[in-house]
Image (cartoon, rainbow, N blue to C red):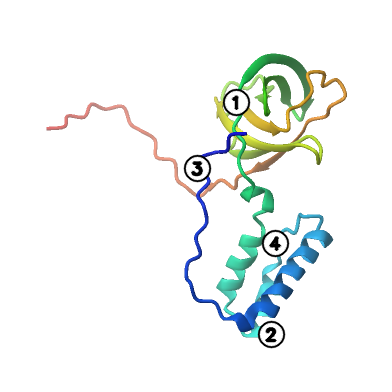
Amino acid sequence: MKTSPMRISFHTPTDHYCEDLIPVDEQICELLAKRKELSNNNPGFPHQDLISEWSQKFGLNEAWLQRIFSAYMIGEEHFLPLIEPTGFLKFVPILKSVEIDNMSYAVTYMKQYTNASIVCVETEVNTSEPFVRLGHASFELFISPEYRCRQDGGCGSRRGMQHSFVVTPSLPDDISGVEFQLTIKPFHENLEYQVVHFKETTVTIK
């Protein structure tokens, strides 16, 4: 299977390692595995007062702890080899849709490859209002624990968006019993910016 060339191989930043740390680092790995299990691999982020408390209790820099826990939020799946679809086979229509809060979500079709599927999802706002703009958000697709889904691309207009997801291993052609779970995480948009409106004028640039 072809993997993405964008995945850069890791090189240790230094040849030095204090081997007295081996038992401590092993305990860290053990605790990370326990943390993953207890959180069902969805740890979230500690409240700021907890980080401040741990910083004072253990004599550790607070900003450093914030960076460490931010790194822990990146799941292991982020570092798995990226499988690129190869060997196109066919298009498979799906046409499953649902409407929630004036938003229509549809899984329109998928493209079958020898080593993966690409699932296409469309989102459209359903309103008669003439001036509407969809906000920015990240989209995640989940099918079942057996399938890995990663966003492969997307585009949009004021009222609609289209996203594609690479699914591995390949989905069956008959997906009548398959459910597609779309998780949408809106970006926090800065509403403090002042809108400066243009005035009707003619500008000469010399």
Q: How dense is the environment of label 2, judged by Cα within 10 Å: few (below 14), some, or many (20 and up)?
A: few
What distance separates the C-alpha of mark 2 from that of mark 1? 53 Å
Numbered label attached to residue 6: 3
Three-letter amino acid code of the residue under disc 4: Phe
Residue on which the image places disc 4: 45
Quadrant hosting residue 31 = bottom right
Residue that appears at 75% across and 16% down: 95
Residue 49 relative to residue 145: left or right: left
Residue on which the image places disc 2: 57
What distance separates the C-alpha of mark 1 from that of mark 3? 16 Å
Mark 2 or mark 4: which comes first in sequence?
Answer: 4
Residue that appears at 76% across and 30% down: 101
Residue 176 relative to residue 185: left or right: right
Three-letter amino acid code of the residue under disc 2: Lys
Tell me the element at label 4: loop
Numbered label attached to residue 86: 1
Q: Identify the residue at the far right of this view.
A: 177
